[in-house]
Image (cartoon, rainbow, N blue to C red):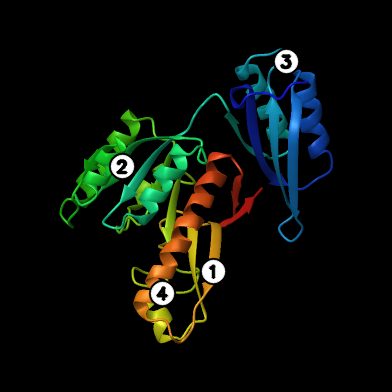
Amino acid sequence: MTTPTPEQTATILVSCPDRRGLVAALAQLLYGHGINILDADQHTDSLANKFFQRIRMDLREMHADRISLERAIAEVAERFEMRFRISYGSHRKRVAVLVSKYDHCLHDLVLRQRAGELACDLPIIVSNHADLEPVARSYGITFHHFPVTAQTKQEQEQRMFELFERERIDLVVLARYMQIVSAEFCERYAERAVNIHHSFLPAFVGGKPYHPAHQRGVKVVGATAHYVTHNLDQGPIIEQDVMRVSHRDSVDDLVRKGRDLERMVLSRAVRHHLEDRVLVADNKTVVF
């Protein structure tokens, strides 16, 4: 059998209480609809008694429409108290990037997307400052400047929501966007907004983590990509990495080294999300 194109595939993510028959029930359902399983991965959290699975499927010989398939999956889901999400390869996700003044993560995301490493469209860049408009223009990406003050924050977020709706945004990436977003933002884009934090969370939360890290004489610095929640810097962690440092490193050295980590960690987290590899449960993630 030939390899299907991405447009001929779909991915389903499943989480539910662990019990016998879960794998068989889904496999039989898919087989009955003429669907071939390309690959499947699963994990059981024995402490929480929860089951997680990711199935990537070949739809070329499916002898039902998508509505019928999703109804059948929903029936199995109800029987097993299952939460599921299905994503079709024919839908290319649309990503909005939020920035302030730092540009290193922005450049990295755009270049990776253009190189084909991130399977998505990047139609807009949004910022609370105008500094990076020339960068957006150089890439041919539409730039939106929404200046934020204490008095205008709510109004500007509403404008942002309207923009995201018009642009049919699937994922929001906070690429060093130095604003605390509202609870409404977190609810609207729950598990669809990824932030990069410049420390190895849960250590050194807040806007300037490198300064207290230097004061503590840390031997590693890190970066953390997580989903945005109303609890600052405490959302479900998707990806992390660290780099060794020493007593010879100044705060500026930590910042410079940390930026390399920020680029890599954020791009990996975005790729995990775009490829439908992330499941959230109890403020933690399973990343297949």
Mark closest to the chain's N terminus, 2 or 3: 3
Q: Residue at x 75, y 52 (%)?
A: 44
Amino acid type shown at disc 3: Glu
Q: Say few, some or many: other residues with alpha carbon within 10 Å of mark 4 (under 14 / 14 to 19 / 20 or more).
A: many
Residue behind mark 3: 61
Q: CA gap, disc 4 to disc 2? A: 27 Å
Mark closest to the chain's N terminus, 1 or 3: 3
Q: Which mark is residue 125?
A: 2
User: Observer-nearest residue: 157 or 59?
Assistant: 59
Q: Is residue 189 visible?
A: no
Q: Is residue 86 visible?
A: yes
Q: Which mark is residue 177?
A: none
Mark 1 vs mark 3, foreground winner is 1
Q: CA gap, disc 1 to disc 3? A: 45 Å
Mark closest to the chain's N terminus, 3 or 4: 3
In the rendered image, residue 32, in percent from the top left (x then y), is placed at 79, 20
Check whether the beta carbons of the residues at disc 3 and disc 4 lie within 8 A of each other: no
Element at label 3: loop
Element at label 2: strand
Q: Say few, some or many: other residues with alpha carbon within 10 Å of mark 3 (under 14 / 14 to 19 / 20 or more).
A: few
Residue behind mark 1: 242
Q: Residue at x 40, y 62 (%)?
A: 232
User: Observer-nearest residue: 279 or 210?
Assistant: 210
Q: Residue at x 49, y 83 (%)?
A: 246
Check whether the beta carbons of the residues at disc 2 and disc 1 lie within 8 A of each other: no
In the rendered image, residue 182, in percent from the top left (x then y), is placed at 32, 52
Check whether the beta carbons of the residues at disc 1 and disc 4 lie within 8 A of each other: no
Residue behind mark 4: 254
Q: Give the left or right position of residue 119, taking residue 57 as reference.
A: left
